[in-house]
Structures are given as structure tokens and as C-alpha cells.
Image: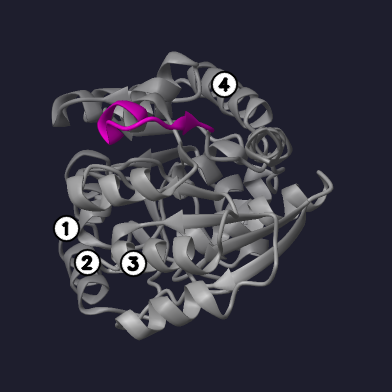
Amino acid sequence: MKVALLSPWAVRCGIASYTSDLAFALSKQDVDVYVVRLHRLGAKSVEYFEALASRRIPKVDLIHVQHEYGLLQGGEAVLYGTLRQRQGATPIVTTMHGVGAPVPDEIVADNSDQVIVHNKWCEEKYGHPCAVIPHGVTPEKTVLMEEAKDRLKLEGPVVTVFGFVGPYKGYEQAIRLIGMDFPGVNLLAAGGWHVDLETTYIARMKELANALAPGQVKWTGWVEKDMLPVVFGASDVVLYLSKYITESGALLTALGHGRCVLANSLAPNREKEAEGALTTFSKEGELVMKLEELLQNPALRHKYEEGARSYAEKNSWDSVAAMHRSLYGELL
């Protein structure tokens, strides 16, 4: 079976990371994967989408588009229209990494033989027929905590915020929380941006940290893959404070490393909480109370660490790739 994946590739991008993991796992399921690179950044014209859909896709059995609104920049009608015109009866599968925009969602639904979403909440919000296949997780081992903290030059409890550093990720909330309510606790800000070493927002967050939590916040910058076992090995608790998600590769990376995660009470997170993979909070007071309890109670942290590992094993990339392989087979 030959499958073309339309996706960003080899860049700092959650969808690119997702596609890389999926492609490797599919290759172990007797699927020949051809990655057709969709530019992550920069403006995209009608001509760009027409060329992508008509000339850059090799002869394959099935085309699988990794969709995200900002990635396609409103080009759904051109991309899918050209795919249907130029690729004939070749089945089209689309994974929706975000849902909730009525016009693009309808275009994708009308032009895809099957649409995949990551969880039940996305299925309900999408509002069109689709299949639920979880976002895959890679179960990983971490460096022993004492060694990891030593390598990062940290002493005492460590609370980690991991992922791209942007306003919606909750870094400002984490800095204020640690500075005002948790003296003596380290905040490990483990993340960077898609390009460059720093942005105006990151610089502003560093100034805020110096003002509210001097000496408590350590910035790692972009975390390369080989440093993830160190970052998570040093983490007593991982905070996930994003204000809105459909799914999160950053959160799943923390679960894959078997960390205790305290996450904002968003619908996709509550689904994982119901499976024992993490715990959530709804209000600031509950966040303070739960974080304090987790830092003071190793047995409770261990409970969520075990839940995280169990979730990662259940939703490993091998398992997720097998679901994709089965779906492809049904369409063919």
C-alpha cells in the first residue's frame, strides 16, 4: 500500500512531529509512505496549492492530508478541488488537527473520503461524519530525577511548563503562580518558538520572571529530542495551562515520559482525566491547592505517573498506526 502524506516536514511544528511519528509507525505496518511537504510558514497562493495537488504527489493508492487552519490559510477549496480534479478516484483522508471553523470544515468533509479527529470532543465539535483515532504517544524513559536536576543545575521541587512559548500556552500564569504562591519551587520553562531563538513575547516573559520570581525560573529554549528525557526526568509536576486545545502533542509528550500532569480543565483533558492519565483544575484557587498537594504527596504523584504510562502504552504510535492501516484498507 502506497500512501502520500501532505504535511509540514522537518521543521519546528507539532504537525510535522506528528507526521514524522505516524510515518515511521506506518512503515512498520507495510505501508510505503511518501511525504509531500506542505510549507509550514509563508503565504500560500492559489498557484501554490494547485502545483502541490497536481504535480508534486506521486502515484499512490491513497492521499492523507494533515489539516490545520493556519497551515492552509483558507486554501481548502483550491487544494481539495485540485486534488479531486487531478488525482481522479484516489481516496482522500484528512486528519483535522483543529476543528470549529464552519466553512473550511464543510469543504474538508465534502471532499474527503474519510476525516479523522483525535477525540470525542472534536468529533462533536466537527459536526460531520468522521472517525476518532487518538493522537499517538511515544512511551519513553527519563533520566533519573537526581541526575536530571543536577544536569539542569536545579535544586528542590521542579514544576515544568513545556511547549511553544506563546500567549495562549499559559506561561505568564505559571510565572505569576510560582512567584506569588510557591517560594522555593523552580519553574522550568521548557520551550522555544517555531523560528529564531527568542520573540518579543519570550523577552517580555523573562522580564516578568525576573520581576515576580527572581531566581526561580529557568529557561531552556527549544528542547531537542535527546534532551526531553532530562527535562521530564527533572520534573516533579508538569503544568499544562493552555486556554484552548483540540489536542496537544506537548501534553502527550509529558504523558509519554510518565510525568504527573496537572492540566487546565478543557474537554480533551477531561477525557484523559477520566482514564486516569492526569488531573485537572478549573479555577486559580483549585490550581494552587492541587499543585501544592501534588508537590507534597509523592504517592499521589506516583498514581498519576502510572496513569500517564498506562495511557501512553494504550495509545502508542504502533497502535495508532494500526488503526490508520485498518481505515486505509477499508477505503481501498
Q: Name the quarter where the C terminus is drawn.
A: top right
* CA gap, disc 3 and disc 4: 36 Å
Disc on res. 307: 4
Q: Which residue is mark 2?
A: 205
Q: Quadrant of residue 226?
A: bottom right
Above or below, comparing residue 24 to residue 73 in the picture: above
Identify the residue at image location x=30%, y=51%: 107
Secondary structure type for disc 3: helix
**Of the residues under marks 2 and 4, which one precedes in the sequence?**
2
Of marks 4 and 1, which one's residue comes earlier in the chain? 1
Residue 155 location (% of width, % of height): 50, 51
Q: Amino acid under label 4?
A: Gly
Q: Secondary structure at mark 2?
A: helix
Magenta span of residues: 123-133
Q: In the image, is 112 to the left or to the right of 284?
A: right
Whichever of callouts 1 and 3 sits on the residue coming sooner in the sequence is: 3
